Image: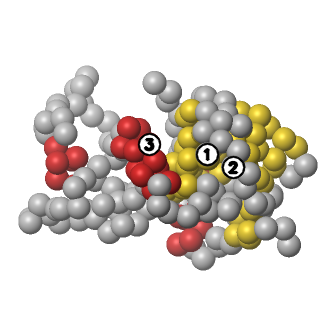
Amino acid sequence: MVWLDGLDMHLVNLMDAGFRDGYPDKTHPVTRPEGAADAEFAFNLLPVDYKPGSQTTPIFNYPYARSREALEKMAKFHPIDPCFGYKMKYINPIDGGWAMPTISTWMSLFPKGFKSMPYRSTDGVVLVCVEGAGKTRIGDKVFEWGPHDVWTVPSWLYYEHEATSDAVVFSFSDRVAQEKLDFFREQRGNA
């Protein structure tokens, strides 16, 4: 297991909107059985009495095996994106939007030999290699990566990926927040 926190705390702090309640006991009781959220929300069905209470996904657990399988299946019929390979976003099954209201998340498959075209955007992106290997050119620097490596692409710098083996990469950014504020911009290919 690899644990990587991607937090929106700077945005929350900027908005002065951070709150927390201390729980009086040492542990919080388990009130729902394991798998309840998956059963209620992960099969393109909702309980008839469901009432949304948050913009955040009610699942908040996206097993890697399912993500990997989805990428493999998509790669069999869907055209490869010249900038992103096979890339899928994690969604909120209630409305099809992003899984969280402030952090965008994706999983990508880069087939061996894939070389992306240049791309840049206003969101700063954090990437994590889950499996495989490759390299990413960011501006005029090249970074090689392999399993469990973490790297970032700053806002508005051109970058390109090249896979030296089949590679799966998880990424996250503040794109969804930028989209809601109408800040997000992107550019494919060199200008």
Query: Along the polypeptide, which appears first: circle 1 or circle 3?
Result: 3
* Residue type at the position of mark 3: Arg
- The residue that appears at 61% across and 45% down in the rendered structure is 111
Residue 20 or residue 9, whichever sits in front: 9
Image height check: is 105 above or below 93?
above
- Where is mark 2, residue-wise? 114
Percent position of residue 36, x then y: 16, 43
**Residue at the limit of the structure toward the right, as seen here:** 140
- Where is mark 3, residue-wise? 68
* Residue type at the position of mark 1: Pro
Measure the C-alpha gap from mark 1 to mark 3: 13 Å
Image height check: is 146 above or below 50?
above
Residue 10 or residue 50, whichever sits in front: 50
Left/right placement of residue 53 relative to residue 106 reads: left
- Are discs 1 and 3 less than 8 Å apart at CB? no
Decide if residue 14 is in sight here. Answer: no
